[in-house]
Image (tube, helix red, strand yellow):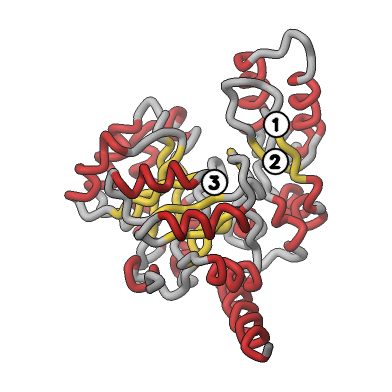
Amino acid sequence: MRADICKILGIKYPIIMGGMTLVSGSSLVAAVSNAGGLGIFATGDKAQKGGIEWIRGEIRRIKELTDKPFGVNVAMFSPIVKEIIDLVCEENVALVTTGGGSPAPYMEQLKAAGVRVCPVVPSVEAAKKMEAMGADMVVAEGTESGGFIGKVTTIVLVPQVAAAVNIPVIAAGGIADGRGLAAAYALGASGIQMGTRFMVCKECTLPDVYKQAIISARANEAVVEGSHLPKVVPHRSIKTPAADEIIAYELTPDANPKGFQAMFDAGRVETTGNLDKAVLGMGQSAGLIDSELSAAEIMEKIMGECRAALDGLKAL
């Protein structure tokens, strides 16, 4: 029987926001949760720059803006990961999504505090390992997604993961509308995670030039940096001069992970509105996005589209 993640997480709709570094701030997280989904706050790069007190302040601000459940995304390679885990336990966060390493060292602590654990996985093997160590659910994220990516497409990955594990599976990658939610159900998922769709949201604090670029982008303008270098996790972003420069660097004889990381980091911190210099994570689902909506409008639109798609299938 398919798990009801709405009941498990105490939310209205089976829609989770992706934890997007430098994007998923307190205002957007609260708006998504207030609209019936599960907002996910991203600690990410700012965990290193703002420190644990900045994260504490953002979590407490979310609580001021919503009384609904929300989650926190934790990069397991963060130098302050232990402090972040301690904090989410203290603050009774509903869910932690993880990436960039195994949450195994903190699983017992999180479960004891009542925090559900949902690793983001790119493969069947990873999903089975996460289930074995006690994960409550997993996000099966296909290569169409924005940000750091795996190699398998969503439509192939999700049904394999759903068949391989007994915990709820959340589908992610290339999903931005209700047809994607209906498809995720058909593939065996219990819900969806979306990132790019919520970047073009009225409550998202990204500069308007970024949002308009996503609205205007075609799916093939979601390019990948890092695919030509060993020991580098590929990253999908909107096509910009900065992204093109990084990809060109990868193909030079002297290219190396350290040089790549320096260029990549410089682009990722550009959030002032200079699109030319930005490396802005964006999934192929940008091709499905044609307008900026509020979080509540996005939720209602997706659920309406999903119902229409499922009704259409019944008619067959």
Q: Residue at x 50, y 52 (%)?
A: 140
Gap in Å between the C-alphas at discs 2 and 3? 12 Å
Looking at marks 2 and 1 on the same chain, the residue that comes earlier in the sequence is marked by 1
Pick the front one: 165 or 50: 165
Residue 80: percent from left, percent from top: 35, 29
Q: Nearer the viewer, residue 101 or 47?
A: 101
Q: Is 153 on the left-hand or right-hand side of 67?
A: right
Q: Residue at x 75, y 45 (%)?
A: 222
Amino acid type, callout 2 = Ser
Direction from residue 58 to residue 254 in the image, left or right? right
Q: Give the residue type that dot 3 points to.
A: Met
Residue 221, above or below 80: below
Identify residue for label 2: 237
Q: Which residue is mark 3?
A: 20
- Residue at which label 1 appears: 225
Please state if 126 lies on the left or on the right of 264 as rendered: left
| Mark whose residue sits in front, 2 or 3 | 2
Question: Residue 8 location, x and y as percent?
Answer: 32, 68
- At mark 2, the secondary structure is strand
Q: Are marks 2 and 1 in contact (CB under 8 Å)?
A: yes
Marks 1,3: beta carbons within 8 A? no
Residue at image x 41%, y 29%?
78
What x and y, as percent, mark residue 155?
A: 62, 58
Residue located farthest toward the bottom when viewing the structure as drawn: 315
